[in-house]
Image (cartoon, grey):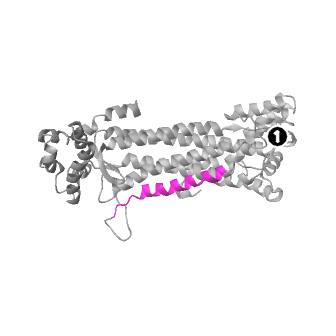
Amino acid sequence: MVPRYARPDMVAIWEPENRFRIWFEIEAHATEALAELGVVPKSAAEALWKWWATNPSIDVAAIDAIEAVTKHDVIAFLTWVAEQVGDEARFMHQGMTSSDVLDTCLAVQLARASDLLLADLDALLEAIKRRALEHKMTPCIGRSHGIHAEPVTFGLKMAEAYAEFSRCRDRLIAARKDVATCAISGAVGTFANIDPRVEEHVAAKLGLSVEPVSTQVIPRDRHAMFFATLGVIASSIERLAVEIRHLQRTEVLEAEEYFSPGQKGSSAMPHKRNPVLTENLTGLARMVRSYAVPAMENVALWHERDISHSSVERYIGPDATVTLDFALARLTGVVDKLLVYPERMQKNLDKMGGLVHSQRVLLALTQAGVSREDSYLLVQRNAMKVWESDGQLSLLELLKADADVTRALSPQEIEEKFDLGYHLKHVDTIFARVFG
């Protein structure tokens, strides 16, 4: 992870000490369940929890030093705990394998990371909703292929983003549920040396569900779906970021990122106000998406297990969640402080001499008895004159002066087709669908 794009709460989930704490909880809960089943003495679990209650810190450096000799992280951890707890620690890890600890820990970390990301999405949704309601009826030009199309409102742009991130939230809830599974099933996942009830106990204590078939690892299709979901959320971040970047272009300038006092846009050009935050979000989205492919490649492990997935997950677990957490928070700030310019939106709407109303005239001509082909030709030949004049000519006036058009429509009927409000008549309906 890059500290520049990291926030403390998410980083803390992936810190080595936190990982070891989760490992201890897994081992202690498993020992507790084994004691209840009479497999190990109750004093073993009691000794573990007693030490835990009085020794809140974990010596990461000491564990790392042991691993330098054992070349095995879980064994190093168990060795260190045994040194702290004493003889009763020999009952830890009874019938378990390393993947039981590693995979269950990863499930806990991804679940906790999901909870932070869900909170991030809630904050973003709140900000988007506020701006959507604020600009519900603020008219602006809709664009297709980057070209003026027909009027929309800035509130509709925000409502669309709200609906999209609501879907992202639903997907993340499903992905969290899918990835939050516990495996305490022993070597090759047969429970030969550990009772399935131990797994159930540990899962309940850690807020996880039981993995139905874990081989020796939790199936990686779950993780692939999780990281793919993060990639989709990142893509939605980029979509809104790109929209804002386009709206901030000098020749558009319908909205722009907040420019704080003392902020500088360029080392060379003092006049610059660049969309640096949304450009940054575009880059961060690329990184989060990039983690989805190795997660998918992790699905195909050899037989009951191999560790080709392990190194990948040590990267993508922290990096994807930390980066997405930062990106969601940054986008929330952008939306919250976004400068919106309704006057410029209206100016751009009016820029092309009424071309935005061409479809209404086309439809009116067809309803007046003119063939669609001829109707299109009549409107287009006048529209092209406006286009080539860079909006200096008026489509309304050209149509009213076109005898072929006025044979079908009166000047008053033509004028009626240039009503901006017509395009906004169903905004309430759309908002009701999005916000309820």
Q: Is residue 174 left or right of residue 247?
A: right
Q: Position of residue 65 (x, y in %)?
A: 78, 58
Q: Residue at x 66, y 38 (%)?
A: 180
Asked whether residue 22 is in view, the answer is no
Q: Residues within 10 Å of mark 1 (few under 14, many from 20)?
A: many
Above/below status of 205 relative to 84: above
Tell me where the magenta segment starts and ends, as one range: 272-296
Q: Along the line of sight, which residue is nearer the eye, 78 or 360? A: 360
Query: Quarter of the image containing the N terminus?
Result: bottom right
Check the picture and name the quadrant holding the C terminus: top left
Q: Position of residue 217 (x, y in %)?
A: 75, 44
Image location of residue 69, percent across then percent down: 83, 59
Q: Tell me the element at label 1.
A: loop
Q: Amino acid at mark 1?
A: Gly
Q: Nearer the viewer, residue 86 or 385?
A: 385
Location of mark 1 (residue):
186
